[in-house]
Amino acid sequence: MGQLIYFQINVEFDNISSFGTGQYYVSIPYNTQNGFMTRGGCLHDASTNKQYSIGGHVNPGSNLMYLSYVGSNGHDDEFDYNSPVTLTTEDSFHISGWYLKQNNN
């Protein structure tokens, strides 16, 4: 819809052989006009049948969304291979939201 972009990203871990280290991030289709934060994500922990709210933050002019979850202290903590839970190949997550595409006149 013009400069307004909707995205939905689904990640299944069933084909992962190594979960790596460091904060997870995903790429969105276009660089952003403005920085933004979305809270429209959910991590599904299959072993406990629990769900964890996840969010993503993108800096202005970037297309990299760094993922986080709300820690026990109420602050955002980095979503990685063992936080908020130790990931397994049965787990998955999804995240979605809206943003303004960078204007490249």
Image: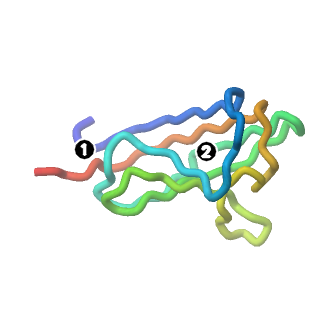
Residue shown at 36% from the left, 40% from the top: 29
- Tell me where residue 3 sits by quadrant: top left
Residue shown at 67% from the left, 57% from the top: 69
Rendered view: 98 above or below 22: above
Label drawn at residue 96 = none
- Tell me where residue 77 sits by quadrant: bottom right
Q: Percent position (x, y) of residue 35?
A: 38, 61
Q: Residues within 10 Å of mark 1 (few under 14, many from 20)?
A: few
Residue shown at 31% from the left, 59% from the top: 61
For the residues labelled 2 and 1, the Cα–Cα distance comes to: 22 Å
Q: Percent position (x, y) of residue 21?
A: 67, 55
Depth check, front residue: 95 or 28: 28
Rendered view: 48 above or below 63: above
Depth check, front residue: 96 or 67: 67
Residue shown at 51% from the left, 45% from the top: 26
Q: Quadrant of the N terminus?
A: top left
Amino acid of disc 1: Gln
What residue does disc 2 label? Answer: 41
Rendered view: 35 above or below 32: below
What residue does disc 1 label? Answer: 3
Judged from the image, the secondary structure of the residue bearing numbered disc 1 is loop
Q: Percent position (x, y) of residue 47?
A: 88, 36
Q: Residue reaching furthest top?
A: 15
Colour mode of the rendering: rainbow
Q: Residues within 10 Å of mark 2 (few under 14, many from 20)?
A: many
Judged from the image, the secondary structure of the residue bearing numbered disc 2 is strand
Amino acid of disc 2: Gly
Depth check, front residue: 94 or 1: 94
Q: Is 80 displayed left or right of 8 in the figure?
A: right
Q: Percent position (x, y) of residue 56?
A: 54, 54
